[in-house]
Image: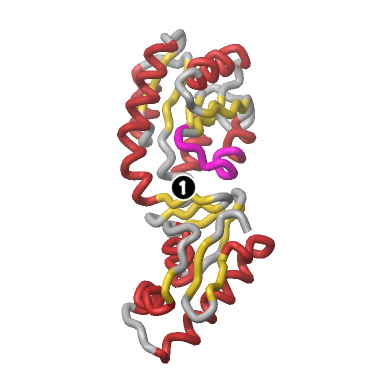
């Protein structure tokens, strides 16, 4: 699990990271709202711990940007802030935040809250988000990224890439792939399948070799070409 901590107080950020890393979770620290939003789009972490009072974009602005973006709207967020007024808490939760922790806080309590949020979201996310190598596909929004950069895929290309990524290294029969793309398989669809593969490889650029060919059989996904 990867957690992004967006907190301008360096000491607090390091305290949060220390306690989360003890649980085996990876942490990335950012101390500026604008940089936090950039890292959210690039890393697409499993969870964001977000301060409200930040330089540049404040936490609420970052959160609204996340919810307006198809690639980031499903990432869970815990607000961590000194602003403990009821109105502030209600605003964060009403916008769709998963939890709200006020400073000063107990590190043990924060760890428990993070664990609870991840437990609630990881099962559903694992079914909707496909990750393999540098690729991340969100089957809920049809958003695809490669090394954090969005890929402009057609629906057929997305379905093809997702199906292969879910079975890395295993050759998938041409007729089975035709059924996935077109709903049925026959010889008339063979050229159409090859065309989709060709166009997909072109869009993958330097990663085109991730889509491998087994002559006479079909195609496969290689996460490390």
Q: Does the magenta stretch include residue 162?
A: no
Task: Residue at 52% x, 36% y: name it.
Answer: 62
**x and y percentages locating residue 118 in the rendered image:** 37, 32
Disc 1 crowd rating (10 Å Cα; few below 14, some 14-19, many 20+) is: few
Q: Residue furthest right?
A: 206
**x and y percentages locating residue 67 in the rendered image:** 44, 43
In the rendered image of this protein, does residue 80 appear above or below residue 167? above
State the quadrant of the C terminus: bottom right
Whether residue 149 sits left or right of residue 128 in the image: it is right
Q: Dividing the picture into quarters, in which one does residue 178 lie? A: bottom left
Task: Residue at 46% x, 85% y: name it.
Answer: 190
Tell me the SS state at disc 1.
Answer: helix
Task: Residue at 57% x, 56% y: name it.
Answer: 150
In the rendered image of this protein, does residue 69 appear above or below residue 205? above
In the rendered image of this protein, does residue 187 appear above or below residue 40? below
- The part of the chain drawn in magenta is 39-47
């Amino acid at each position: 699990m990867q957690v992004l901590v967006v907190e301008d107080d360096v000491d607090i950020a390091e305290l949060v990271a220390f306690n989360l890393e003890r649980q085996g979770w990876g942490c990335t620290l950012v101390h500026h709202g604008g940089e936090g939003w950039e890292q959210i789009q690039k890393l697409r972490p499993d969870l964001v711990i977000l301060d409200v009072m930040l330089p540049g974009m404040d936490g609420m602005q970052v959160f609204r940007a996340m919810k307006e973006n198809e690639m980031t709207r499903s990432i869970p967020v815990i607000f961590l802030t000194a602003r403990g007024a009821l109105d502030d808490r209600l605003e964060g939760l009403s916008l769709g935040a998963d939890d709200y922790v006020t400073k000063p806080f107990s590190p043990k309590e924060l760890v428990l809250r993070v664990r609870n949020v991840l437990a609630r979201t990881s099962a559903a996310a694992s079914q909707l988000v496909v990750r393999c190598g540098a690729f991340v596909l969100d089957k809920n929004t049809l958003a695809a990224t490669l090394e954090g950069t969005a890929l402009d895929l057609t629906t057929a290309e997305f379905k093809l890439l997702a199906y292969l990524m879910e079975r890395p290294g295993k050759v998938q029969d041409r007729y089975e792939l035709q059924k996935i793309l077109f709903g049925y398989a026959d010889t008339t669809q063979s050229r159409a399948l090859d065309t989709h593969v060709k166009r997909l490889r072109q869009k993958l650029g330097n990663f085109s070799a991730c889509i491998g060919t087994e002559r006479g059989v079909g195609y496969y996904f290689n996460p490390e070409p």
